[in-house]
Amino acid sequence: MSPRTLNLTPALYTYLLDHSLREPPILQALRQETQALPGAQMQIAPEQGQFMAWLVQAMGVRRALELGVFTGYSSLAVALALPPDGRLVACDIDPETTQIARRYWEQAGVASKIDLRLAPAQTTLATLLAQGEANTYDFAFIDADKEHYLTYYEQCLQLVRPGGLIMIDNVLWGGAVADPSVQDAATQAIRQLNHKLHQDERIALTMLPLGDGVTLAWKRS
């Protein structure tokens, strides 16, 4: 037994994948193609994608939000887990990387579930709120520009229903959040978010050392 989370050695991480990961071939192909692209480090880990899909299925998610698409790995994982009438509103600003995402969504047969909005995420979320969609989403995944994480969180908290879940990526930021010598804007923004969520009584909170660190914020009734 251990009183703290294990430090995953390369061998133990391989064991974890070998005995847990059930990555569909379409997701594996997308992950491998993305590895050759600039910015490949922005793609989530496969075990994180599987965890997201598990949450979507376990919660019976029908309506979901994603902020930050990149080449579409997380959105594809979520869409595959959604029911046939499920809907994912996916927010991004890059028409080139999202073209890769669209190609894989089509190949996987889930393109009809995904509503891609090529606009700043703040604008898209504000539009959804203006359309009366507050408290109608079951799940939100935030993985976009870090400087706006606090704004995205507040908007998603309005859009997600009571009992819904917000998942936030990169909350450990490669360990930089715990290094006082690192003071760039992105790191400071993540620290501010982490502090705010720790104090926020509107949610039940857990932070997991999965991938680059993920926070799960469950909206209280």
Image (cartoon, grey):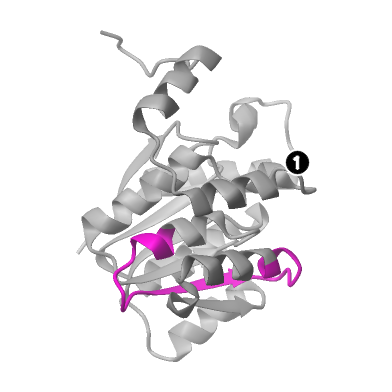
Of residues 170 and 26, the one nearer the viewer is 26
- Residue 99 on image: x %, y %: 69, 70
Q: Quadrant of residue 95?
A: bottom right
Q: Residues within 10 Å of mark 1 (few under 14, many from 20)?
A: few
Q: Residue at x 67, y 26 (%)?
A: 180
**Is 125 on the left-hand or right-hand side of 33?**
left
Amino acid identity at mark 1: Asp
Quick one: quadrant of the N terminus? top left
Q: Secondary structure at mark 1?
A: loop
Of residues 82 and 137, the one nearer the viewer is 82
Q: Residue at x 70, y 43 (%)?
A: 35
Residue stretch in magenta:
78-99
Q: Residue at x 32, y 45 (%)?
A: 205
Residue 93 on the magenta span: yes
Instruction: Please tell me whether residue 180 is drawn above or below residue 50 in the rendered image.
Output: above
Instruction: Please tell me whether residue 24 is drawn above or below residue 163 in the rendered image.
Output: above
Is residue 201 at all visible to an observer of this figure? no
**Is 184 on the left-hand or right-hand side of 206?**
right
Is residue 206 at all visible to an observer of this figure? yes
- Residue 76 on image: x %, y %: 49, 61
Residue 73 on the magenta span: no
Of residues 56 and 27, the one nearer the viewer is 27
- Residue 60 on image: x %, y %: 23, 63
